[in-house]
Image: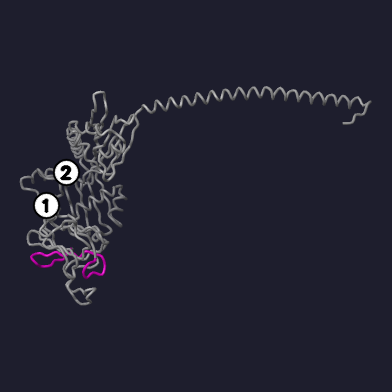
């Protein structure tokens, strides 16, 4: 820098500038020195904090290792309690101890695929086990100083009787859904009337139904539907009604209001099918032989492998291959009735000639063996050797209400039939359902 001597102002300015520079340098030097001390102090503080945090985490982890943990186990298809204990590295001696406790073995031995078991484990040792036995019962097992103790916790279900109705536009399930009813309830209605109504072919727009049933809740939350107590279905103008009743010593079933069983001795169709591909026709032209040949049965189109059920209880008269039928089964029933199931792909395992079968029992599977142009079941119904149209033949009913129980049935059925007439349940029906639910719960608790 060049200075002009004699210029006082410039010199003053220069001195001021130099003083300012020195001041700034001094401040920066002091700040740097103090900064170094601060960083060192901060480093020491951070190291102490980190060390304390690590020690605290280690202490917490050590304490946590001593606390029980809950292990949720979803039961597999082939799982047993012993297998699960070994997977969890738990003592099978403890399992033997559990199974030796009074009434506990029956509650533990039989497991169901998909159910949830809760194990409480501490230091690789079982300290608790929880299993839900039913929607209202939970079994809890815990270890105490004397061994294992169990308790059955009851959380009762609340039952409310309601009546709903709907009109069909497209399907039963659509109508039920539109009316706020579940698919399960719709399935139950179809199952009740399956002997009288073909819910694939017979349902028409405008058909309607009214149903009185139980709605089940727990702690105020809905958990599903209970039994259908009474139901009315109007199909193409024909009225069908059913009331649930349990005769002495028998399981509950459905009867008409005058005491006749809705259950028939035969199923109308012995499989779940997609469509009827050929109906009963004495003058049909055979699709393979291309000539007039009577079609003395009904063909139900369905995918290969669809289960085929026995239409009624009886004895296997023939099982094997027979000409155009391919793989075929013939069943003899009471009252000189015979049913035939043709074009099967295979038979039920172990089924033999002369063996008795129950209604609804799977006897074979849909195929296209013999003279068949596609997968379907050929089904025949013969009465005293004469072929009848399986879709139209009147089916014999099962046993009606015994005369000794008719008075009790009428007393039971009257208020239920009234709900179908009025569209709402009588108040005492709700009390009756709740008492029945409480009775079932207390009975379960006593087991």
Where is residue 168 shown, x and y percent of the image? 28, 55
The N terminus appears in which quarter of the rendering?
top right
Give the image quarter of residue 76: top left
Q: Residue at x 31, y 41 (%)?
A: 74
Asked whether 369 falls inside the magenta stretch, the response is yes
* Badge 1 vs badge 2, beta-carbon distance below 8 Å: no
At label 1, counting other C-alpha atoms closer than 10 Å, the crowd grade (few under 14, some 14-19, many 20 or more) is: some
N-term-proximal mark, 1 vs 2: 1
Give the residue pinned by disc 2. 415
Residue depth check, mark 1 versus mark 2: number of the one nearer the observer: 1
Q: Residue at x 19, y 31 (%)?
A: 101
Q: Secondary structure at mark 2?
A: helix
**Residue 69 to residue 264: above or below:** above
**Residue 374 to residue 19: above or below:** below
Judged from this view, the residue extending furthest toward the bottom is 291
Span of residues in magenta: 368-390
């Amino acid at each position: 820098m060049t200075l002009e001597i004699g210029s006082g102002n410039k010199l003053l300015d220069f001195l001021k500038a130099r003083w300012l520079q020195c001041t700034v340098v001094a401040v920066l030097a002091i700040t740097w020195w103090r900064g170094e001390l601060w960083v060192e102090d901060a480093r020491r503080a951070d190291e102490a904090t980190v060390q304390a945090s690590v020690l605290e985490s280690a202490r917490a982890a050590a304490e946590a290792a001593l606390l029980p943990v809950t292990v949720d186990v979803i039961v597999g298809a082939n799982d047993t309690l012993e297998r699960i204990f070994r997977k969890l590295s738990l003592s099978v001696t403890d399992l033997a101890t559990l199974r030796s406790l009074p009434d506990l073995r029956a509650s533990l031995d039989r497991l169901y695929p998909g159910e949830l078991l809760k194990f409480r484990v501490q230091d690789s040792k079982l300290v608790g086990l929880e299993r839900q036995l039913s929607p209202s019962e939970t079994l809890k097992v815990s270890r105490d100083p004397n061994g294992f103790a169990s308790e059955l916790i009851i959380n009762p279900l609340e039952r409310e009787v309601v009546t709903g109705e709907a009109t069909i536009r497209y399907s039963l399930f659509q109508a039920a859904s539109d009316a706020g009813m579940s698919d399960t309830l719709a399935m139950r209605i179809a199952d009740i009337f399956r002997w009288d109504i073909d819910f694939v072919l017979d349902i028409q727009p405008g058909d309607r139904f009214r149903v009185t049933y139980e709605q089940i809740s727990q702690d105020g939350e809905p958990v599903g539907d209970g039994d259908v107590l009474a139901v009315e279905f109007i199909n193409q103008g024909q009225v069908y009604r059913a009331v649930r009743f349990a005769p002495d010593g028998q399981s509950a079933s459905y009867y008409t209001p005058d005491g006749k069983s809705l259950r028939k001795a035969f199923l109308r169709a012995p499989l779940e099918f997609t469509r009827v591909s050929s109906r009963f026709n004495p003058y049909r032209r055979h699709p393979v032989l291309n000539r007039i040949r009577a079609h003395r049965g009904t063909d139900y189109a369905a995918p290969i492998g669809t289960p085929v059920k026995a239409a009624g209880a009886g004895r296997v008269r023939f099982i094997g291959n027979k000409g155009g039928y391919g793989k075929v089964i013939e069943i003899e029933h009471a009252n000189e009735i015979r049913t035939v199931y043709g074009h099967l792909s295979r038979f039920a395992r172990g089924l033999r000639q002369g063996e008795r079968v129950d209604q609804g029992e799977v006897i074979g599977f849909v195929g296209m063996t013999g003279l068949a142009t596609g997968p379907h079941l050929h089904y025949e119904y013969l009465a005293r050797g004469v072929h009848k149209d399986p879709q139209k033949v009147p089916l014999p009913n099962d046993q009606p209400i015994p005369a000794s129980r008719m008075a009790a049935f009428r007393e039971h059925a009257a208020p239920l039939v009234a709900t179908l007439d009025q569209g709402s349940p009588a108040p005492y029906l709700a009390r009756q359902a709740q008492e029945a639910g409480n009775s079932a719960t207390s009975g379960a608790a006593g087991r």
